[in-house]
Image (cartoon, rainbow, N blue to C red):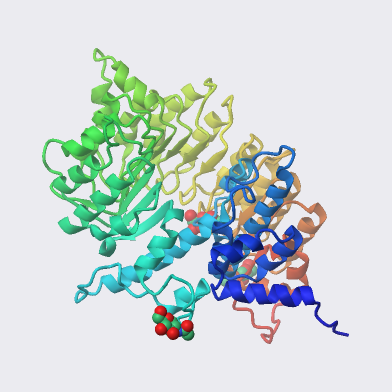
Amino acid sequence: MAEAPSLLSLCLNLIVDELLRGGCDDEFLAILYKIPPELFDSMLPGLTPLALENLHRNMPSHECSTNGPQDENSGSQRKRKRWLNFEGAWKKLYEVRWGDCGAQIHSISWLAKQFEAKHELRDDWQQMYWERHLQNCLDAAAEIAMVPSFSDGIGVIKIPATIVRCIGYWEHMNSSACDYSKFSDHCQHFGLYARRLRLPSALCLPEICDLLRTSNLETLEIHWIKLKDHVDGICELLKQNSETLKSIEFVHCKLSTSFIDAICDSLWIKGLKTHGIEHFSIRISNFLDTSSSALPAGLASFLSSGRCLSSLSLSDDHLRRNFVEMILDVLFDSSSNIAALDLSENYMSGWPSHFKWTSRPGKQLSSGIGKSLQSLRVLNLRNNNLQRDDVDFLKYALVCMPKLESLDLSDNPIEDDGIKNMMPYFVEMSEKPFSLIDLKLGQCELTFNSVSQLLNVLSRWKKPLISLSIGENNLGSKIGALLGKFLSKGLQSLDIDDIDLGPPGFQKAQDEIMGDLKLVYINISKNYGGIETANFLSKLISCAPELTAIDARCNSMPVESLSIICSTLKAMRGKVEHLDLRGNTSLIRFADASLLDELKMNRKSILKLDSSYDPDAPYDQDP
Ligand SMILES: *[C@@H]1O[C@H](CO)[C@@H](O)[C@H](O)[C@H]1NC(C)=O
Ligand SMILES: *[C@@H]1O[C@H](CO)[C@@H](O)[C@H](O)[C@H]1NC(C)=O
Ligand SMILES: CC(=O)N[C@H]1CO[C@H](CO)[C@@H](O)[C@@H]1O
């Protein structure tokens, strides 16, 4: 039986309608804020983004602490509740528009996920909503501005109706003072929420500064800069935000020396001899005219005078050897506190010999060199065509990096001899209180010979390695026993995909696994272990209570594997949320709906199987 609507709910509906049409003036809003909280809150879920914004933004400050639920003192209870209600409404709107909390997981990093959970982020959903909306507008405007015949100002670009309607604005809305058809309207109204933006070169014009004048940008990603006009536009924007900018990234750019100088000069904070950039990155780009014998002066002084600069990434930039050496010299000579250095994907060998030169006997490491290497925690040298002699030189640098936690040498042809050259470093580390926790040596053309030595040394470390990646090396089944033992040494993440383990390798590994493992993530894909893969996984699942993600694709598992793995999963009721068994169609037939239903974590299915499931296919090989 439907009840007749109360007078109260009819009134509320009328008010919501009025809010939705944008027809509430300040006076009316002032009255609204006085209605009892329960009634007020009941209006929020029905509002469009624009209407909610209107209500939220005009809220008298004593009613709604914009700082969030910080002070727990008496009397703040009500404020806190109101804040939470607004937050809840914004979060809902965000999820409705962009789905799953906006968390974009690029590559599945299960360990990172664990670390993240520890320091909870306090989100501001209103800010996140409008920032992302503005990004959608920027992208749409850029698409129009990119057309060669485009000649208007960017501010008057018409934002597509599909985007504008998302925020609850229709063209016939005439009552409010604002118009949301133009790009400039969105910048004007929501620019103040933008902290992090991605800017394609088509919008890097001087006009953008005026459009984003209310923004306090902290993170800026700039794409496709190639022309002087772009550089002029972007420099103005950088100057305008130099006090708040912390992270800046250039992607797909072509940068001449004069461009780089201009950009770096724009980052100085007015009146101070420093900049506030913490993260500086130029990726998938080209430095033009880098053959000269000196770094662009602007870049050199930028690198040497930022006390905050903690992360530098020059990845996939076709760097030349002398350019890298000059960068290293500047970093070493300055008193920088650089913690992360990414030179990956540059495919240039030879430069590590520079370390030998700087640290040769007789020429003691100057305090400057020692100092900047000492702060380094993450070094990424992936895919640089480094060979065994290069790592021999690298060793000299590594011993000067006592805080190094993460070293990525994967995708370099360093071979067994290369690892053997580095062995003194690994041996020396065993006594250190701080040491490497993450080592990546995937696809390094290694064999059992060097990796067995390495595992022996690593297992004697006082402070155990947390994450090891040695996939895509031809190690063979012999390595199985050592890996099984090594798993018991406190390892949390292991990547051994495609190492030719085979059934005997899995069996040997399984026999050596003892006691409680700390493992969170393992990648054993492409090892063609057959039924032994399933036995190994079953043992692993029962010994590793923290195990969260397993990639076991392409292991030629016969049908009975599924019941072995699944019965352990069910018995253990552990933390596994991701089990990938794709690349083997014979497993599908067992994975009926009830099994997938049983194996769920947080209401999502754990199991990943090939999607080519054909329920009518004959069960030809049934036991
Ligand atoms: C919309 O605004 C214009 C000018 O501001 C006015 O002439 C027109 O009557 C308005 N239309 C509606 C439906 O309110
Ligand atoms: C396992 O390793 C392969 C090869 O390196 C990689 O493509 C895959 O993404 C990894 N699996 C997971 C879940 O990260
Ligand atoms: C696609 C695939 O790898 N299928 C294999 C799954 O496992 C069975 C049993 O070992 C093999 O016969 C299939 O070729």
Q: Nearer the viewer, residue 253 or 495?
A: 253
Image x and y of residue 132, in percent: 47, 61
Image x and y of residue 10, in percent: 74, 78
Q: Is residue 283 left or right of residue 7?
A: left
For the point 14% across and 46% down, the residue is: 258
Q: Nearer the viewer, residue 149 or 183?
A: 183
Q: Is residue 129 above or below residue 479?
A: below
Q: Is residue 26 above or below residue 81?
A: below
For the point 24% across and 38% down, the residue is: 324
Q: Nearer the viewer, residue 264 or 548?
A: 264
Q: Residue furthest right?
A: 1
Q: Quadrant of residue 605?
A: bottom right
Quarter of the figure that contains the C terminus: bottom right
Q: Is residue 319 above or below residue 365?
A: below
Image x and y of residue 140, in percent: 37, 71
For the point 30% across and 22% down, the residue is: 369
Whether residue 623 is visible to the viewer of this picture, yes or no, is: no
Quarter of the figure that contains the N terminus: bottom right
Q: How many marks?
A: 0
Q: Is residue 390 left or right of residue 513?
A: left
Whether residue 260 is visible to the viewer of this picture, yes or no, is: yes
Q: Residue furthest front?
A: 27
Q: Quadrant of residue 620?
A: bottom right
Ligand 3 is found in the corner quadrant, namely bottom right
Q: Is residue 607 above or below residue 220?
A: below
Q: Is residue 524 left or right of residue 440?
A: right
Q: Residue furthest bottom?
A: 616
For the point 63% across and 45% down, the residue is: 117
Image x and y of residue 581, in percent: 62, 64
